[in-house]
Amino acid sequence: ADAARTVLLTGASTGVGLALSRLLLPLQHFRLILTARFALARFAEAGIHESDRVRLRPLDVTDDDERVAVVDEALRDWEGVDILVNNAG
């Protein structure tokens, strides 16, 4: 069975969110959905790229459609979100 846990981390491209992203990336038992409101390019600048266990998604947590899209993707592909770190704003 797949024991990986899915983490949805908002506000992941700067500050505390980026620091936490960097801590989680090497931990293979986590799948990461890293979100940022505007500047997804910041992930590349920080050396963070998509992989089979890392997704980079735009997300303004005040936008209903964007919230639904991110959660729907997690449900469809990874059976949902196990851990939410709501660091946005």
Image: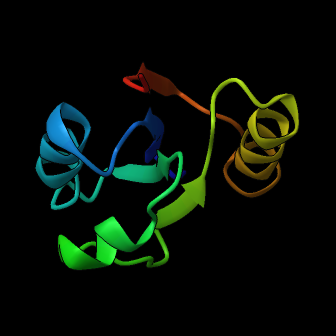
The residue depicted at 53 percent of the width and 27 percent of the height is 82
The residue depicted at 40 percent of the width and 23 percent of the height is 85
77 is higher (above) or lower (below) than 41: above
Q: Is residue 29 left or right of residue 54?
A: left
Q: Is residue 75 left or right of residue 10?
A: right
List x then y, in percent, for residue 81.
60, 32
Q: How is the image coloured?
A: rainbow
Judged from this view, the residue extending furthest toward the front is 38
List x then y, in percent, for residue 10.
46, 35
Q: Nearer the viewer, residue 4 or 21?
A: 21
44 is higher (above) or lower (below) than 38: below
74 is higher (above) or lower (below) than 65: below
Quadrant in the rendering for residue 20: top left
The residue depicted at 70 percent of the width and 46 percent of the height is 74
List x then y, in percent, for residue 23.
11, 47
List x then y, in percent, for residue 1.
54, 51
26 is higher (above) or lower (below) than 82: below
Q: How many circles with numbers are drawn on the protein? A: 0
Q: Which part of the image, by quadrant, shows the C terminus?
A: top left
The residue depicted at 25 percent of the width and 37 percent of the height is 17
Q: Nearer the viewer, residue 28 or 73?
A: 73
